[in-house]
Image (cartoon, helix red, strand yellow):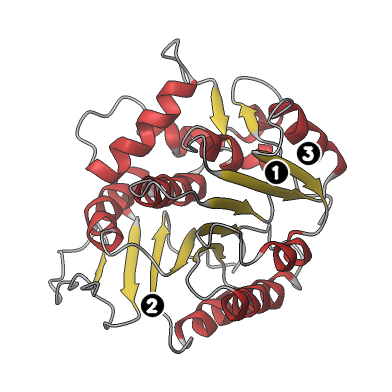
């Protein structure tokens, strides 16, 4: 919806989960010299000032990235993510938080390409100003990312990371996300797809995660982070999830290390929680810092042949 502005939520718990995973995915893809494309269907404004404007009104970053800012005991997956955020704030104070495109631009190599879609007229203008002289390396398009994705897959390099990250303020986003994923897999089955979704007490949100879990013939990893119990009134987002199709085999182990840390550090009054599920396994870990840790079978790394 054109009323949604991500600036109000920049750097919150959902951004931390999403961007930690994004950094790890891009680091993995960069291990091969062959270029890849990063495609963002709902790119937003690019970067957000935290000390003024919309982001300072709700100050959601104070219970998100700010809680990690001075930590020295971060698991490797979180430490790599935080290092990128710190590099964007060279003076040492947390005043700027990147949207997914700006974060990704810091990890792209010369041979890689980025394609960004945004519908909001103000945000797409800001996004274009973030990358004014990028040439063909980074192309910003005002338009529907769901529709634009179809024209880009498969990319010339046959390697891509696709981020699908709508606001979900419009209920139609839920079926659109699932349809975009299934259509994309038909065009480009070997791409890496990362889909962010909210944890809400509404049927559309719960059914989306269930539909993801029923996908057949694909390897996937589903990570969720809750910072509080669902409200008794049934309103509000209490967490978020990231559903990754064709995840690197290393990602599950890295998430197993950082999700308990995030649940403990970002959870409100000890109510943080997380889940980690893989297509080839039953749910493997679920814990809340407020309860004794429950031991379940460990994930087995996928063997590539």
Residue named by callout 2: 219
Residue at point 31%, 41% (across, down)? 78
Q: Rounded to the nearest whole Å, what is the CA distance between mark 1 and mark 3?
A: 6 Å
Q: Is residue 237 visible?
A: no
x and y, in percent, of residue 125 in the image: 82, 34
* Dot 1 alpha-carbon crowd within 10 angstroms: few under 14, some 14 to 19, many 20 or more: many
- The numbered disc on residue 44 is 1
Q: Position of residue 210 (x, y in %)?
A: 50, 83
- For residue 200, which numbered disc appears in the image? none
Secondary structure under badge 1? loop
| Number of disc labels | 3
**Is residue 223 depicted above or below 111 in this figure?**
below
Q: Which residue is mark 3?
A: 123
> Which of the pair 206/244 is nearer the observer?
244
Mark 1 or mark 3: name the one nearer the start of the chain: 1
Q: Is residue 10 left or right of residue 272?
A: right
The correct choice, above or below, for 22 with respect to 196 in the image is: above
Give me the residue at 15% from left, 64% from top.
292
């Amino acid at each position: 919806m054109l009323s949604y502005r991500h600036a109000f939520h920049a750097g919150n718990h959902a951004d931390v989960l999403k961007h930690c995973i994004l950094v790890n995915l891009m680091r993995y893809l960069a291990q091969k010299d062959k270029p890849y494309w990063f495609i963002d269907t709902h790119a937003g404004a690019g970067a957000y000032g935290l000390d003024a404007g919309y982001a300072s009104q709700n100050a959601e970053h104070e219970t998100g990235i700010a809680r990690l800012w001075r930590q020295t005991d971060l698991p490797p997956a979180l430490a790599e993510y935080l290092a990128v955020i710190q590099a964007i704030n060279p003076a040492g104070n947390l005043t700027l938080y990147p949207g997914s495109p700006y974060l990704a631009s810091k990890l792209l190599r010369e041979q890689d390409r980025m394609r960004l879609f945004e519908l909001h007229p103000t945000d797409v203008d800001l996004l274009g100003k973030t990358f004014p002289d990028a040439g063909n390396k980074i192309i910003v398009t005002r338009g529907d990312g769901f529709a634009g994705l179809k024209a880009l897959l498969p990319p010339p390099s046959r390697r891509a990371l696709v981020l699908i990250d709508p606001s979900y303020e419009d209920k139609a986003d839920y079926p659109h996300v699932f349809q975009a994923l299934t259509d994309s897999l038909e065009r480009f089955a070997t791409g890496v797809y990362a889909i962010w979704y909210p944890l809400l007490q509404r049927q559309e949100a719960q059914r989306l995660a269930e539909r993801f879990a029923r996908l057949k013939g694909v390897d996937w990893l589903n990570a969720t982070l809750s910072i509080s119990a669902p409200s008794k009134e049934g309103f509000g987002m209490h967490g978020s999830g990231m559903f990754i199709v064709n995840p690197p085999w290393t990602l599950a182990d890295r998430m197993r290390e950082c999700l308990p840390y995030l649940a403990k550090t970002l959870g409100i009054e000890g109510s943080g929680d997380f889940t980690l599920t893989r297509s080839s396994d039953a749910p493997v870990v679920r814990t809340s810092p407020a309860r004794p840790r429950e031991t379940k079978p460990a994930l087995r790394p996928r063997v590539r042949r």
